[in-house]
Image: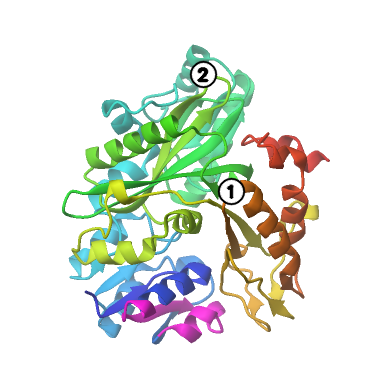
Amino acid sequence: MFKRILIANRGEIAVRIIRTCRRMGIETVVVHSTADKESLAVRMADVAICIGPGPAKQSYLNINNIIAAAELADVDAIHPGYGFLSENSHFAQVVRDCKIEFIGPYSEAMEALGNKAKAKTLARASGVPTVPGSTGPVKSQEEAIQVAREIGYPVLIKATAGGGGRGMRVAHNDASLVSGLIQAQREAEAAFGNADCIIEAFVQRARHIEIQIIGDTHGSIVALGERDCSTQRRHQKLVEESPSPVITAETRAKMNADAVKLAKAAGYHNAGTVEFIYDLDRQAYYFLEMNTRIQVEHPVTEMVTGYDLIREMIRVAAGERLSFTQQEVKLDGHAIEVRINAEDWEKGFSPCPGKIGMYVAPSGKGVRVDSHCYAGYTIPPNYDSMIGKLIVHGKDRAEALKILEVALGEYILDGIKTTIPFHQRLIRDARFINNEVTTKWVDDVFMKV
């Protein structure tokens, strides 16, 4: 087992990894920017090394500085968390070339699955259902129009290297397709350095369902059930829950099997998430993309399965076998996660960095808070506005929702605007309670109330 791990990330995921490492008796090294010098992760880690100024390109995306810190600290492995360099196959290969273990999949698998066009091609070849659309990146506006007319409007324009809703546009006719393609390509080039886009049929009434998988280097790949991430704004997830309120046991089994099938076809190991779009009208699902890293919403899977996914990631990277089999995975109860962001939702979810005054996180049976905040901490303006996650667990969805309502009411986070009031309003809405949710619900209905 590793003796010392470097965490190439920040915020709540860095704190999350540190806590599991402590329980495993592993020392931690945190790299940080000057903007994060007072962060909780810096305070908790055994070693903290500054790798650059606030802008991510000069710190958390600076591969040379991260590798230098890893060699200086004499670490055995690097955990990338999520975001930043977590799905960068070049970074994963550089880490291993430096004789340091990367806690994630091999670079070849990341390249095969991290690109949406390549992943879709592999899914089709593996017999996993895919959304009708282009077989690869469209080369011109004329080709995009041809594909769109063949499958029928509306269509979704999607950057092949995208994520988090960036590089995505919906088009309803030729004109909006051309303008949307130009916008998506520009956005994708700026965000990911890759302007390639694919065209897919846009499912009108959809749920976003994803399957958590994890595999070891001994040939075992296990699916841990689904997460429903349909409550989202502009493709940014707001609420995640497990199990999905609309998926049957039969559909779950099929989706689990397809997720494992795809991972095996790519020679995948470690943690990953296979995402599907579920068509409510056809009651059919289609492969969407695969995330070759741990997800923000992984705690809901941990709450219903009882497994520590970060622990399993570390064990797998160290060459050990998974501590459980597919037959041992059971879903117990219902879990819901809401993302707590430093944003003013009444002003278009505008970021609200600043100094936190009083801070009291909710607690009690069935309540978990993953956060890097504390009283007096100043949230820097340089990074994503998510400052924590509130996760609850109950015997069923109704009980979980009640626990969540109480916990949100107990959450004290003074000094800044947060999305806590938004979540309180959302979970009391009859449409959310009655599962009348689609991926467009927040944008088309809730935000217009």
| Front-most of residues 178 and 267 | 267
Q: Is residue 44 magenta?
A: yes
Q: Residue 326: x, y in percent?
A: 29, 47
Residue at 45%, 40% (x, y): give it.
195
Residue segment shown in magenta: 22-45
Q: Residue 223: x, y in percent?
A: 34, 45
Report the residue that reaches farthest toward the front.
395
For label 1, the SS is loop
Residue corresponding to mark 1: 396
Residue corresponding to mark 2: 148
For discs 2 and 1, the disc positioned in front in the rendered view: 1
Query: How many angstroms separate mark 2 from mark 1 (CA)?
Result: 42 Å
Q: Is residue 289 magenta?
A: no
- The mark that comes first in sequence, 2 or 1, is 2
Whether residue 237 is visible to the viewer of this picture, yes or no, is no
Q: Residue 53: x, y in percent?
A: 51, 77
Is the C terminus in the top left, top right, bottom left or bottom right quadrant? top right
In the rendered view, would you say 86 is above or below 59? above
